[in-house]
Amino acid sequence: MKVFEKNGHKIIFGDAVEALEAIEDGSVDLIFADPPYNIGKKFVDLADKWESDDSYLSWCYKWLTLCINKLKSNGTMYVMTATQNMPHFDIFLRNKMTILSRIVWYYDSSSVQARKYFGSLYEPILHCVKNPNDYTFNAQDILVQARTGAVRKLIDYRKPVPTVYNSKKVPGNVWHIPRVRYRMDEYENHPTQKPIALLERIVKASSNEGDLVLDPFSGTFTTSYVAKELKRRSIGIEISEEYIKIGLRRLHIATEFNGERLRRERKTYEPSENENQTALSLFEKKSKWNTSSRKRSKAS
């Protein structure tokens, strides 16, 4: 394992289970876990496929147990997985933690959809706490617009004193947040990148400034990025070198890795550095020519 650290943010380059074992028990306030789903996706040179469902679940139970151990007594954990695996996660975790919410992250899709069955347009998330009587939930920090008569200022006559409906509410357990698309500013080259908006809601709701947030499968390090933006501390674990480089860049921990300058991958529709330099040179020449022309005009 290799560790990179700066200003309260740590990146661990290595296997998730080994890295988790090295973290102090009872030291983490919030965990967001988005592991490989065992559905065959390709992560650079790593295949997201185990030899059997049993071997996949055995591995998952190992890191889930470690995550629980790392949480403080009032800690919170959010866990994602494929829809077909979530029942197993649910049964395993409900015997060790209290599951407060079973969240559906719903998104639309512009890509090709199934034609012989109902295609999947959501991913499940479990919201779990160690102690149902002592945990962080900052309701006021995550309010959304209420889709009731609040916008039209309708009156709730059921109350002792008739009152206008609240215009804000705590989100329900169905979250409609768009997936990250190629043309979005936040896009990184990763097949299952999670949106900043999704992690902002989780981090705001279940942690406070200065708290420690852990992501054992960091990918594009969105969890750590959001934690930093919201003045939390973070630990991100990742086994792929390509994604480690994304994390080092996004968290401003390093500008180089193994002699390579770290920069965001250029998108196909963006000009190259040479094209930018050519455009800048032409602009500078045009500016100089305009300045000279104005000087000649004044002299005459």
Image (cartoon, rainbow, N blue to C red):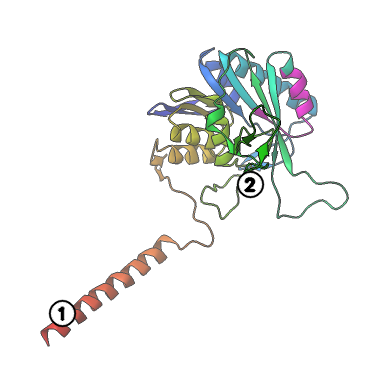
The Cα–Cα distance between marks 1 and 2, rounded to whole angstroms, is 61 Å
Q: Position of residue 38 (x, y in %)?
A: 73, 34
Residue 209 relative to residue 32: left or right: left
Q: Which residue is drawn at 68% across and 22% down?
A: 100
Q: Which mark is residue 188?
A: none
Furthest-bottom residue in this view:
300
* In this rendering, the label closer to the viewer, 1 or 2: 2
Residue 64 relative to residue 189: left or right: right
**Nearer-N-terminus badge (1/2):** 2
Question: Looking at the image, can residue 275 be seen?
Answer: yes
Q: What stretch is highlighted in magenta?
A: 79-93
Three-letter residue code for mark 2: Arg
Q: Name the residue under label 1.
A: 295
Q: Position of residue 293 (x, y in %)?
A: 21, 81
Local packing at callout 2 (Cα closer than 10 Å; few below 14, some 14-19, many 20+) is few
Q: Which residue is drawn at 53% across and 19% down?
A: 29
In this picture, is 9 found above or below 74?
below
Q: Where is residue 216 in the image (x, y as percent from the top left)?
A: 58, 27
Three-letter residue code for mark 1: Lys
Q: Where is residue 82 in the image (x, y as percent from the top left)?
A: 74, 34
Q: Name the residue under label 2.
A: 152
**Quadrant of the image occupied by residue 281:** bottom left
Secondary structure at badge 2 equals loop
Q: In the rendered structure, does residue 84 fall within the stretch colored magenta? A: yes
Q: In the rendered structure, does residue 68 fall within the stretch colored magenta? A: no
Question: How many numbered marks appear?
Answer: 2
Residue sitting nearer the eye, 207 or 89: 207
Q: Which residue is drawn at 26% across and 73% down?
A: 287
In this picture, is 140 found above or below 149?
above
